[in-house]
Amino acid sequence: MDGVLFELSEVTVRGPDGRERISGMDARIPDHGITVLAGPSGSGKSTMLRLCNRLEVPGAGRVSYRGAPMEDMDPLELRRRVAMVFQRPTALPGSVADNLRIADPGAGEARVAAMLERVGLGGFADRRAAELSGGETQRMALARALLTDPEYVLFDEPTSSLDPSAARSIERLAAQLAEDGTPSCWVTHDLGQMRRLAHHLVVVVGGRVAQQGHLDDVLRSRSAEVASFLAGGDEE
Amino acid sequence: MTTVDVGFLGVASSLVLVVVALVLSMAEGLGLERSILWASLRAFAQMMVIGAGLSLVFEPEAPMVWSWLWVAAMVLVGAATVSSRVGGLRGTFTNALLALGCAQAVSLAVVYGLGVMPLEPRTLVPVAGMLLGNCIGATVLAARRTLAEVQAHRDDIEVRIALGWAARDAVRPHLAEAMRTSVTPQVEQTKIIGLIALPGTMTGLLLAGVDPLDAVLTQIVVVFLILGSVAVTAVLVGRGTARRLTTADHRLVLPPTG
């Protein structure tokens, strides 16, 4: 179990319509570096990510965090340890500082300012959050998530609605976080992004893990299923 | 002061207006003839059954428990009506039953506890019926609006939940809007009462030959009771619906759309 943060064993998740979004999945996400969950749209990557901070629960199978069953943990505590940045940049009402204090109402001005500085939004504290660009909103969302001092960050296609330069700036922040000791898991179907970010790669196809391991190992020994995804995927 | 005694002849005479509706439907090609006939027949039959039932409940020697059973049956039918109108949301019947039951309990406790009216079948059944009739719309609206608000703000709610908020706290900012929307029509109606049309209770009392001042005072009591009941049901149904859209482990579970 050494070095594994999340482990999914025989996990099945059904949507509200009863359709299986993940079927008997086995996956391991390490506790270091950046793990990329790649795969075609609708393959179950986001569902897999949502299982990791219990926004979804498995219909069958088990999800473990540091070797302990997730269902035995306090979900509120877990979510403060495992932060999430969503696909759609979401600004809640109020200023940028108000948005950050949703994560920690007691955060003082200096802490808010330092966190904004860290994501490249120095001096933005008093700006109205609704007036930020998509890229700025997503960086604010990351600052908000980091204010809980998480051990790990989950990124659910955070750059899919951003222009390439805004997307690169979020990628750089994730890389910097990993370097500074906060590992993350990143969902994407963009092969260029996958190659730029991944230390560890999990390829998800049709609700199952097609292949997982170190990026170079997976690319070298790709199965036919993975080769077909890599040949047909998007690249930016 | 004379009382109005309509009688069956009066009912038969009022059928002239139904005939007018039928003739207009035929002349304008509306195709509503069958529907108008069925509606009129149904209204007549339903009211006759209700009248027969009320006659039994209102008998001087009839035990009070019959009136309470009548009220309980109305609450059950009310909850079933709400459940069928909302649709697609599990637990609406229980939710509506609790909300309507609580609103009735609070309102009737005020009316009879403070001695606003004497507790007897002739006051209990009509007052409870009137409250219920006015609360159904607000109950349906509160359940639908809560669902719509939560669906529309799903991203905002999940952002808060993912930051470690309890699910009920994450939903709360969007619940107020749903409740406001449900209570506002009744508040607006209360503001203009008597200005545009004479309200139902007062009209009934005036037709029955009651002194206008007494009729007005009774109507004011009814209006205040309705306002309070609508507020109680909207808040309870809003909260109940929100609770059904979240889980004990603080997740959002929305019914499938479409």
Image (cartoon, coloured by chain):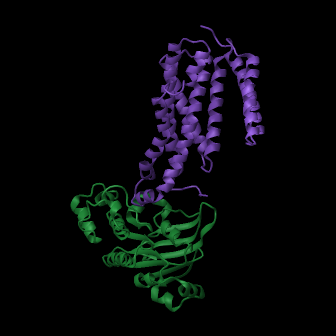
Chain colours: A green, B purple
| Residue B78 image offset from top left, x and y in percent | 62, 35
| Residue B11 image offset from top left, x and y in percent | 74, 21
Looking at this view, is A186 or B86 the one in front? B86
For the point 49% across and 51% down, which residue is it?
B149
| Residue B93 image offset from top left, x and y in percent | 61, 42
The N terminus of chain B sits in image quarter: top right
- State the residue lying farthest toward the front: B27
Question: Is A197 left, or right, of B126 in this rendering?
Answer: left
- State the residue lying farthest toward the bottom: A220
For the point 40% across and 81% down, which residue is it?
A197
Tell me if residue B163 comes above or below residue B80 in the rendering.
Answer: below
| Residue A129 image offset from top left, x and y in percent | 33, 61
Tell me if residue B103 comes above or below residue B120 in the rendering.
Answer: below
Q: In which quarter of the image is residue A195?
A: bottom left
Q: Can residue B58 be seen in this view?
A: yes
- State the residue lying farthest toward the top: B1
The C terminus of chain B sits in image quarter: bottom right
Q: Is residue B248 visible?
A: no
Looking at this view, is B44 or B94 the one in front? B44
